[in-house]
Image: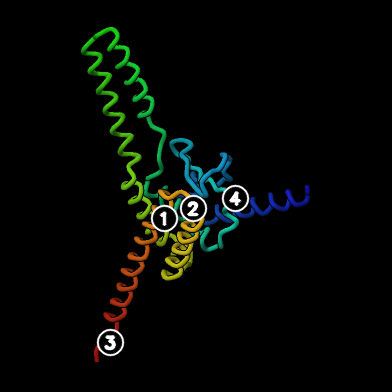
Amino acid sequence: MTSYATSTARVDMGELRRLRGLLPPELQSWVTVEPATDVAPPLVTCEELGKDQVEIQIDLAKWEQLALDQRNLLFWHEVARIQNDTIPRDGWEMAALAIGLGGAVGELWVQDGLLLVLALALCGISGFRLYRRNNGQKTLQESIQADEKAIAIATRFGYSLPNAYKSLGSALKTLIEQTPRKRQRDRYVKRLDALKKSAARAKDRVKSDRSASRPAY
């Protein structure tokens, strides 16, 4: 039993080292890759630890069930989110909303009109910012943009364009099959549809470039 646990730990550490090697050079000094420690964590996600430090967290138990190319493209999707600066941050909005609600209730009791208006305004501003940050369409669009950039990163690491699209598409199909929650599954389906359209456009560009480069006789 101890030998098995030790072997598993070595495999996990080896995979983390491999993934760190897949970070673009410009990110290696401030992005780390660690195993997820939460209960029932997502497969892969990012967390901002400080102003200049981001951690990519991997659920290694689920991660090892994916093919190598699928892992690579899903990892580069998270890298792309970091590069696009679309990682959710724990901002002041929740605290401001709580303060505003508490203040509004308090001012109703003491009947101070001006302070009540200020408390309600604080609630409105913080609530609107929370809505924008958690807007489903916005986060979906950010994921689609990260998929596009993940393809570009893959080509930097030696993937051909068709293989990069194929690997990410395969990864998304696997996530669709393995995801029980309909809302999350629908997001993967929409990302896959967008990826297919992007692959078709890339294929058309390659054909057009080849036609333009043919010598005229």
Nearest to viewer (mark 1 / mark 4): 1
* Callout 1 amino acid: Tyr
Question: Would you name the residue on which mark 4 appears?
Answer: 60
Nearest to viewer (mark 2 / mark 3): 2
Q: Position of residue 97 (x, y in %)?
A: 34, 25
Among the two numbered marks 2 and 4 on one chain, the one whose residue lies closer to the N terminus: 4
Q: Position of residue 16 (x, y in %)?
A: 59, 51
Judge whether 204 appears above or below 29 on screen.
Answer: below
Nearest to viewer (mark 2 / mark 4): 2
Q: Secondary structure at mark 4?
A: helix
- Give the CA separation, mark 1 to mark 2: 9 Å
- Identify which residue is drawn at 28% across, 33% down: 128
Residue sticking out furthest to the top? 110
- Give the CA separation, mark 2 to mark 3: 50 Å
* Callout 3 amino acid: Pro
- Give the CA separation, mark 4 to mark 3: 52 Å
- Identify which residue is drawn at 34% across, 73% down: 203
Question: Would you name the residue on which mark 1 appears?
Answer: 188
Question: Would you name the residue on which mark 2 appears?
Answer: 179
Among the two numbered marks 4 and 3 on one chain, the one whose residue lies closer to the N terminus: 4
Nearest to viewer (mark 4 / mark 3): 4
Judge whether 154 appears above or below 121 on screen.
Answer: below
Q: Quadrant of residue 77?
A: bottom left
* Callout 2 amino acid: Thr
Q: Secondary structure at mark 1?
A: helix
Split into 4 quadrants, where in the image is the C terminus?
A: bottom left
- Give the CA separation, mark 3 to mark 1: 43 Å
Question: Would you name the residue on which mark 3 appears?
Answer: 215
Tell me if I can see residue 156 in this picture: no
Residue 143 placement, left or right of 73 = left
